[in-house]
Image: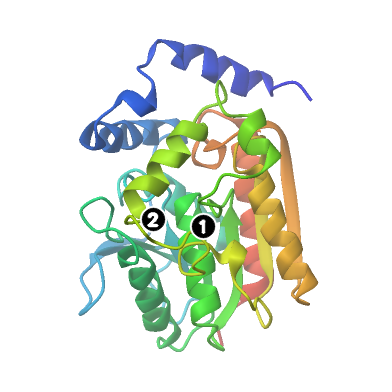
Amino acid sequence: MPLDPEVAALLERQKGQPPRSSLSVADTRQRLRDAGALAGPPPSLALVEDLHLPGLPPARHYSPTTEAGQPVVLFFHGGRFFSGDLESHDTVCRLLAISAACRVIAVDYRLAPEHPFPAAAEDACRALQWASDQGVPVAIAGDSAGANLAAVAALAHPTPALRCQVLIYPMLDPQGSSPSYAEYADGYGPGAIDMQRGWTLYLPPGTNPRDPLASPLYAADTSGQPPALILTAECDTLRDEGEAYASKLIESGNPVQLRRYPGTIHGFFTMPGTLSVAREAIHDVAAFLRLHLGPAH
């Protein structure tokens, strides 16, 4: 299928930028912060506050209401394990809080190469345990590398409070072995070289790429998982691994909704100010969260 016209226009505008693979770690991080503008202007909320909780990485709390007892969506940003932060995904988290009518807690997990594997996975697991202890329904979500961390935490700590998971074009296969990895390796936004760089910075030499804390795709047991919504982009190196994980969860008896968005690319979800397909995806995610979280009682 051809590229979505809005996506094609975006890629055309980006042609003058230096390749991501040529940027330093610091410049890569800045580019992702700058790309946050593609989400559009940040909407106002009743509550936005930074959290500093004992033993946990910094986090930011978004809520459309000041009422207590609302469900929580624990969100992990993308950025290939070495970029992304609370600022890069601020507007998206605000939109999710409004659309899903619940609190969103964005977790600023430790980044590679300063903090290689398993630091980010450990942060995700601790954050899920904290959220599960709050006495409200919890969802876990993330995009790209953040979706990896969400899946890892859901597998490692499937608590009764965890009602569902949302994995947005998850980054799951360090070996980059799928057909889409080759088919969309270059020219469609973040490509194969960019993903491989992320894995290289995240996984120390000698790490088993099939360690389930690094890649849930290779977990021996994926049974007993909460309902999952997995989003993939048609023209994305990571498309096939996300869909393979959906199949793995289904084969283990878990309820899964898989949605592939045609004509779009990796990263599209964070561009609702630019792409109508991103607004559609946010609507779909919000509907799924409302269905499974429901009103708190």
Q: Is residue 277 above or below residue 55?
A: above
Identify the image quadrant of residue 238.
top right
Q: Nearer the viewer, residue 201 or 95?
A: 201
Residue where numbered disc 2 is placed: 45
Identify the image quadrant of residue 17.
top left
Q: Nearer the viewer, residue 105 or 141?
A: 141
Please say which color scheme the image uses. rainbow
Can residue 80 be seen? no
Name the spot of residue 143 as percent of width and height, x first. Answer: 50, 51
Name the spot of residue 181 as percent of width and height, x first. Answer: 61, 37
Q: Would residue 276 be found to the left or right of residue 271 on screen?
A: right
Residue appearing at x 41%, y 53% in the figure: 77
Q: Quadrant of the C terminus?
A: bottom right
Can residue 194 be seen? yes
Residue appearing at x 37%, y 74% in the figure: 127
Identify the image quadrant of residue 104.
bottom left
Residue appearing at x 56%, y 66% in the figure: 216
Name the spot of residue 19 as percent of width and height, x first. Answer: 39, 21
Indicate the secondary structure of the residue bearing disc 1: helix
Q: Which mark is residue 147?
A: 1
Indicate the secondary structure of the residue bearing disc 2: loop
Q: Would residue 124 be found to the left or right of residue 169 on screen?
A: left
Question: Mark 2 or mark 1, which is nearer to you?
Answer: 1
Cα distance between the residues tagged 2 and 1? 25 Å
